[in-house]
Image (tube, grey):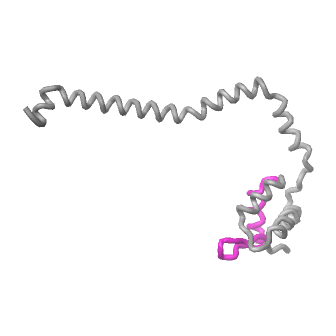
Amino acid sequence: MYGLEAISHHNGWAISIVGILIVFTGLVTLSLLIRLFPNIIALIEGKEQSKTQPEPQKEHTQPKTQKPAINNSIKEAVRQYQHLISWMGEPFSLPRLIELAEKRGLVRPHSTINQLIHASVIQPDDKGFFLWHAR
């Protein structure tokens, strides 16, 4: 007895189906564990932080309140970003400008740069970079 007849005679089809179901169930279980893993880690870290680190969170919020409040008007934004751009040089890339603005602690750099683009203070140079056109 050879071939498909031998497979049928020795329950090969049932064994194949059971094997496929075992592998499929294992893969589904693994994917669910991988999907839930960040939530489990966050839950564990959240409990540890609430028990052991209530003071560092307060310290983390204090530097934000100690920084001087930055006026978000367009004139103030022009002054702040003009200093950064003069330091960077022209033409400049927006990702680098955003990175420097975040390092300096400027408020909402993405939104502010978007306002400057809409006000035509920052204009593209058609080469992938941008130029500063302050009034």
Please tell me whether residue 125 is drawn above or below residue 17 in the rendered image: below
Quarter holding the C terminus is bottom right
**Does residue 133 appear left or right of residue 44 in this picture?**
right
Residue 118 location, x and y as percent?
A: 74, 67
Q: Nearer the viewer, residue 68 or 41?
A: 41
Q: Is residue 112 above or below residue 86?
A: above
In the image, residue 56 lies at what x, y percent? 83, 33
Q: Quadrant of residue 54?
A: top right
Image spot of residue 131 (x, y percent): 75, 73
Against 109, is 5 above or below?
above
Residue drawn at (9%, 35%) of the image:
2
Please indicate whether residue 69 sits to the left or right of residue 12 in the image.
right
Quadrant where the image shows the N terminus: top left
- State which quadrant residue 97 falls in: bottom right
- From which residue to which does the magenta span run? 106-131
Q: Toward the viewer: 86 or 68? A: 86
Q: Is residue 110 magenta-colored?
A: yes
Residue at 70% from the left image edge and 73% from the top image edge: 124
Residue 84 appears left or right of 36: right
